[in-house]
Image (cartoon, rainbow, N blue to C red):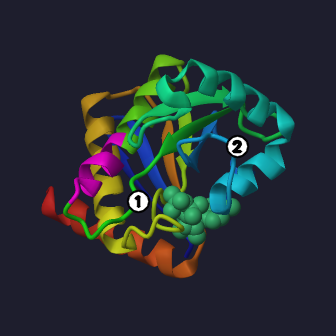
Amino acid sequence: MSRVSVSVGGSVLELVRGDITQQDTDAIVNAANPSLMGGGGVDGAIHRAGGPAILEECKQIVRTLPGGRLPPGCAVITTGGKLRSRYVIHTVGPVWRGGVEGEDEVLASAYRSSLALAKEKGLRSVAFPSISTGAYGFPVDRAARVALRTVLDFLRENPGTFHVVRMVLWSAADFETYRKTLEELAASQQ
Ligand code: ADP
């Protein structure tokens, strides 16, 4: 089965295997790079599927950022262009440097900032990819623990804010890693 879910704080946390660009949530989250000018992986797929309106808005946002860059752990929001989602939340995860340079904290912050921005905008559903585990090289089992813990904590601390938060995993192996990790976290919290 390629879909599992748990209820927490009146919200549902879902894991699905699939393509982030096809999600019907109010927002999808982009694993962007600090330039916000697009790239490979999820970033490229989102810009291709959503069309030029997303990049246009990113360019305007970049002009307002100190040094023209979005720091890792932070998030901004643009239109979803032609996507089914009305919005794209762009966040920057950490580049993996062995795990001793605060990568866990920065990754947690990327999830938290994205959720906080969605909440501020009154959005009810958000879909995330597995941030930092592609080109940025973060080990997926460790990233899954950080991602799921952070989302679960946010849902508990902000009850009723979201209808659904969905993690969209591209590969079967990543889906399985997230599924097992969620099972472990749920068991340890009972
Ligand atoms: P980062 O630079 O943050 O590591 P990447 O885009 O390189 O981001 O990869 C993040 C994760 O997203 C990887 O696990 C990759 O397999 C996955 N991915 C790639 N394309 C998609 C897609 N269309 N939908 C969901 N996940 C995707």
Q: Quadrant of the C terminus?
A: bottom left
Q: Secondary structure at mark 1?
A: loop
Residue 165's spot in the image, x, y percent? 48, 44
Against 46, residue 56 (above or below) is above
Three-letter amino acid code at the position of disc 1: Val
Q: Nearer the viewer, residue 15 or 133?
A: 133
Residue 156 in the image, given as x and y percentages of width and height? 26, 36
Give the residues drawn in magenta, as a range.
101-109
The correct choice, above or below, for 55 with respect to 186 in the image is above
Secondary structure of the residue carrying numbered label 2: loop
Residue in the foreground of this view, choosing between 14 and 73: 73
Which of discs 1 and 2 lies nearer the camera? The answer is 1
Marks 1/2 in contact by CB < 8 Å: the verdict is no
> Where does label 1 land, which residue?
95
Dominant secondary structure (helix, strand or loop) of the stretch shown in magenta: helix
Callout 2 amino acid: Asp
In magenta stretch: residue 11: no
Residue drawn at x 37%, y 47% as measured from the top left: 7
Is residue 169 in sight in this rendering? no
User: Which residue is tagged 2?
Assistant: 24
Q: CA distance from mark 1 to mark 2?
A: 29 Å
Q: Quadrant of ligand 1?
A: bottom right
The residue sitting at 55% across, 36% down in the picture is 125
Residue 44 falls in image quadrant: bottom right
Q: Nearer the viewer, residue 73 or 108?
A: 73
Where residue 55 sits: x, y (%)?
A: 76, 36
Dot 2 crowding, Cα within 10 Å, few <14, some 14–19, many 20+: some
Return the disc, 1 or 2, that comes first in the chain's sequence.
Answer: 2
* 117 or 76: nearer the viewer: 76
* Quadrant of the drawing holding the N terminus: bottom right
Whether residue 102 is in magenta: the answer is: yes
